[in-house]
Amino acid sequence: MQRVAVFPGSFDPVTRGHESIIRRAVPLFDHIIVSIGENGEKKPLFSLECRLRWLEMIFKHEARIEIATYTGLTIDFCRSRNAAFILRGLRTSADFEFERGIGQMNKMMYPEIETVFLLSTPEYAAVSSSIVRDVIRHGGDAAQFVPEGIGFNDEL
Ligand code: ADP
């Protein structure tokens, strides 16, 4: 059976931390669906189209990586795509506590799912989309935190 993983997130914007986790997961799975969740409660800084376009650009040469969007529960999206794995990244103990709750509740609702965690590499442990958004809002240079080729000038 194909090992299909969903890597869910907001990617507002995608960072080098996300990119690193996704690339490191390529040898672990046959297919990775990087999935932008549309969450009604969060108002993103960047449009869905823009976040989708960036992810497609970054992974255009990776045959095993697909970019998708979804609404609703991540586990329902996983079921619809026959994905038995949810991939998540861990930076800090705060990430762990947050992820533990989601992962364990997802397991109760969908026992076949396994959440797989990769630890962030040390150089990206401090990188977060929310801090990148703050840097951009205040006119700072966020280039070192986001994948090559991503520019913000036309997107806001
Ligand atoms: P969400 O809104 O679900 O938190 P994000 O786009 O912020 O979505 O993050 C998606 C996933 O990427 C989460 O598992 C998060 O912990 C992980 N992640 C974010 N930044 C990093 C980083 N710098 N290093 C490793 N993992 C990260």
Image (spheres, rainbow, N blue to C red):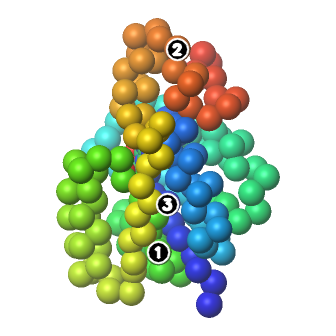
Ligand 1 near label 2 (Cβ, under 8 Å)? no
Residue 152 x/y as whole percent: 58, 21
Q: Is residue 151 visible?
A: yes
Q: Is residue 115 above or below residue 39?
A: below
**Residue ID for mark 3:** 7
Ligand 1 near label 3 (Cβ, under 8 Å)? yes
> In percent of the image, x 52 and y 21: which residue is there?
142
Which is nearer the N-term, disc 2 or disc 3?
A: 3
Q: Secondary structure at mark 3?
A: strand
Q: Secondary structure at mark 1?
A: strand
Residue 36 x/y as whole percent: 49, 52
**Residue ID for mark 2:** 141
Residue 29 x/y as whole percent: 61, 73
**Residue ID for mark 1:** 85
The residues tagged by marks 2 and 3 sit, at their Cα atoms, a distance apart of: 27 Å
Front-lying residue, 18 or 71? 18
Say what amino acid the circle numbered 3 marks.
Answer: Phe
Which is nearer the N-term, disc 1 or disc 3?
A: 3
Which is nearer the N-term, disc 2 or disc 1?
A: 1
Say what amino acid the circle numbered 2 marks.
Answer: Asp
